[in-house]
Image: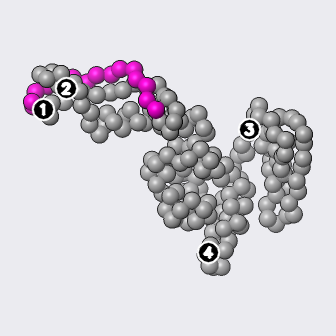
Amino acid sequence: MNSPFTGGHATLVEEKATTTYRGEEFDYTRRYYRCDDTGIAFTDDETDAWSLEQIHSQYREKYGIPAPEEIKAIREQYGLSATTMSKILGIGDNQYGLYENGEMPTKNIGRMIATIKDKNIFSMYVVMARNQFKEREYNRIREKVESVKESSSYSIENNRYSCQWLFVLPVRPAVYRYKKTGFARWSKSKTNQTFALV
């Protein structure tokens, strides 16, 4: 790399660093260049992106937020546009597309996106968004979602809940289950296609 200050050589430097992201501190390896002639440190787009990716990866892992390629794969699984996904989830006109392109969702939205990989959960969101689409478009979306093969269920371990629900697809009546204590775990019954915290 040539120095933008003198045109001479610049050396790539890596060092441990700590930064604050969304109010939390994260350790990462920072990359930057140092001009051999002046000693001035500088970065370029590539070194900045490399550092930011480490921070984003830690944040995503800590809060269960899918990576951009996973977010895109979830949408493609249903064959829907990013705009349609945004409308279904109620997150803005094309916010879903921004998440696919690397923008970091909030913790809540990131976790919501992670859960809709399961078509039974996503189906509930589609039904709740029914009035945002014309009848023909809504039916087209439902057909696409229903044509997807069932995906695996999710697990939530070692967390205590006082109120736990049994979610049933809209074609069946809703059933609610209450427990005072116990560990929560998502489970799926193949016989009635329900999801429950048990």
Ranked by sequence position, the earlier of labels 2 and 1 is: 1
Is residue 103 found left or right of 107 in the rendered image? left
Q: CA distance from mark 3 to mark 1?
A: 53 Å
- The residue lying at 33 percent from left, 22 percent from top is 14
Q: Residue 99 bears which disc, if any?
A: none
Identify the secondary structure beneath mark 3: loop
Q: Quadrant of residue 60?
A: top right
Contact (Cβ within 8 Å) of mark 2 with mark 1: yes
Ranked by sequence position, the earlier of labels 3 and 4 is: 4
Amino acid type, callout 2: Ile
Ranked by sequence position, the earlier of labels 2 and 3 is: 2
Ranked by sequence position, the earlier of labels 1 and 4 is: 1
Amino acid type, callout 3: Ile
Colouring style:
one colour
Is residue 144 found left or right of 167 in the rendered image? left
- Circle 2 crowding by C-alpha within 10 Å: few under 14, some 14–19, many from 20: few
Where does residue 43 sit, x and y in percent of width and height?
27, 33
Segment tinted magenta in the rendering: 5-20
Relative to 38, does residue 195 appear above or below in the rendering?
below
Name the residue that disc number 1 marks.
Answer: 5
Q: CA distance from mark 3 to mark 4?
A: 33 Å
Where does residue 1 sit, x and y in percent of width and height?
18, 30
Image quadrant where one finds the C terminus? top right
Ranked by sequence position, the earlier of labels 3 and 1 is: 1
Identify the secondary structure beneath mark 2: loop
Q: Is residue 151 magenta?
A: no
Q: Residue 133 bears which disc, if any?
A: 4
Amino acid type, callout 4: Phe
Q: Residue 40 bears which disc, if any?
A: 2
Q: Residue 156 bears which disc, if any?
A: 3
Question: In this view of the protein, which residue sits in the foreground, 56 or 19?
Answer: 19
